[in-house]
Each structure stands twice: as structure tokens, then as C-alpha cells.
Image (cartoon, rainbow, N blue to C red):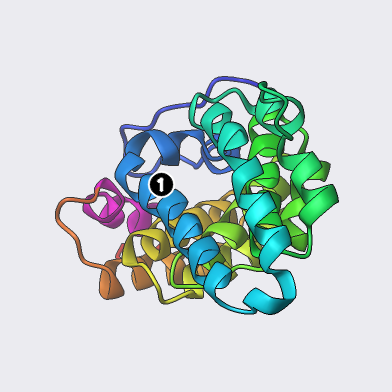
Amino acid sequence: MAKRKTSQSADETVDVQEVQAPAQPFWEKNQNLLLYVVGGIAVLVAAWFGYKTLIVGPQQTEAVNASWQAQAQFDRDSFKLALENPGGGYDGFLGIIEKYGSTPAGNSAKYYAGVCYLQMGDFDNAIKYLDEFSPAGDILPAMKYGILGDCYSEKKEFDKALASYKKAADEEGNELLSAYYLKKLGMLNEYQGNAAAANEAYERLRRDFPNQSSPDWRDIEKYIYRSGGKK
């Protein structure tokens, strides 16, 4: 992959590599949020563990117990090991999905598998498992659609990427995620020459998510100018 270009002037055109960058830059800049997301998955698993106990309880217990080693490899960025063979005789996320896919822990494993495949550059399998993942709560739906947008952008299926970024931005659970994916929505529209749609996304980011601590918001006037607004 070519290196992403940097921009200093307000009227410089957007580079597709800025849009296509998968999850890595966001993860590096927002580690606390991602820890919260992973913690949110654990909370969902725990909540579902108390629900439908008589139906899926035994399998759920096995699935949760089987997940810890795969999650440990995931936390180390050892994505292939997390998927296939985390060690200690434990199943990776793929094995957990195969054995316990109908349980809440199996559902969470689909999210992890999708992220692993994205990080490994296997975008088709990333899309496959993310499509199968059923998100709940305030954060996970936006994360699912945003990561799908990254996958489609990498595959140069830009219409699908735009639709996914819009879904992520429209989720109301977390302002940081909404602002981040509005920026991606604007940049991809700008790259495709959709100046009006890009400007609409940037204006929404400026209006609805003011945050002086966010570089996405602090630079918004540059994005608006670049997409043809406020000349």
C-alpha cells in the first residue's frame, strides 16, 4: 500500500489513502475507546449469560471459557493466532464460531474475527464475519458499520463504503465515533468528486459535534473550504 499523503494547504485534494486506511490509525489514537468497546463486548457476553440460561447456558459457559486465550492473542495484535490457534489447547475465534456460533460469546467472536481479518488484509472474510455479527448497545453498531466501510473502501467498492460510513455516522451511541465516520464519509465523497455530499458531511460534523480536543473538528473549516463551502 502506498504511503498516505499529508496535506498542509486548505485547497489540496483529498487522497484516497486517507480514506482507505483501515482500523489502525483510529485504534492508535483512541485506545481508551477501543478498550471500552472490548469491555462492552464482555459486558454483553455477561448480560446474555444471565439471559436464556436454561436454553444456552451450558454452551455459553463453555464458549466464554474458551474465549480468553483468543482474546489475549488479539490484545497482542497476534491476529492469525487469535483466529486459528491461540495456544494452550484453546480454540481461536473461528473454532469458537464453529462450535458456539449461536451463543452470545460466539456472536462476539464474529466481531473479533472480522477485525482480525481486516488487520490481516483479508477484506472478504472480514466482511463475511462482520455481516454475521449482531451488534447491540450504544457503540458496537457504529463500530460494525465503520469497519465494514473500511473493508469496502480497501476493496474500492466505494458506494458500499459510503453507505457503511453513513450508517456508522448515523448511530447515536457515541459522539466520537459519529464525528470520526462523518469525516470519513466526507473525505470519500470528496475523493469521488461528490463535493455537495462531502460538504454536507463536513458541515454536519462542524455543527453537531463541536469538540475542541478533537483534531477532526479543529480542522473542519479546512475540509469545508476544500469541498467548496465558505468560499
The answer to whether residue 148 of the structure is visible from this angle is no
User: In the figure, residue 53 lies in which quadrant?
Assistant: bottom right
**Between 170 and 129, the one nearer to me in the picture:** 129
Magenta residue check for 221 = yes
The answer to whether residue 213 of the structure is visible from this angle is yes
Residue depicted at 72% across the width and 50% down the height? 152
Total numbered badges shown on the rendered structure: 1
In percent of width and height, residue 225 lies at 34, 56
Residue depicted at 72% across the width and 30% down the height? 121
Q: Is residue 9 left or right of residue 160?
A: left
Residue depicted at 52% across the width and 31% down the height? 72
Crowding near the residue tagged with mark 1, few <14, some 14–19, many ≥20 C-alpha atoms within 10 Å = some
Query: Relative to 112, is 174 above or below?
Result: below
Residue depicted at 48% across the width and 74% down the height? 171
Please, what is the dominant secondary structure of the magenta stretch? Answer: helix
- What residue would you read off at disc 1? 34
**Between 191 and 174, the one nearer to me in the picture:** 174
Magenta residue check for 193 = no
Query: Relative to 133, is 6 above or below?
Result: above
The stretch in magenta equals: 215-226
Q: Amino acid at mark 1?
A: Leu
In percent of width and height, residue 25 lies at 44, 35
Query: Relative to 227, is 15 above or below?
Result: above
Indicate the quadrant containing the C terminus: top left, top right, bottom left or bottom right: bottom left
In percent of width and height, residue 93 lies at 71, 41
User: In the figure, residue 133 lies in which quadrant?
Assistant: bottom right
In percent of width and height, residue 136 lies at 55, 72
Numbered disc 1: secondary structure: helix
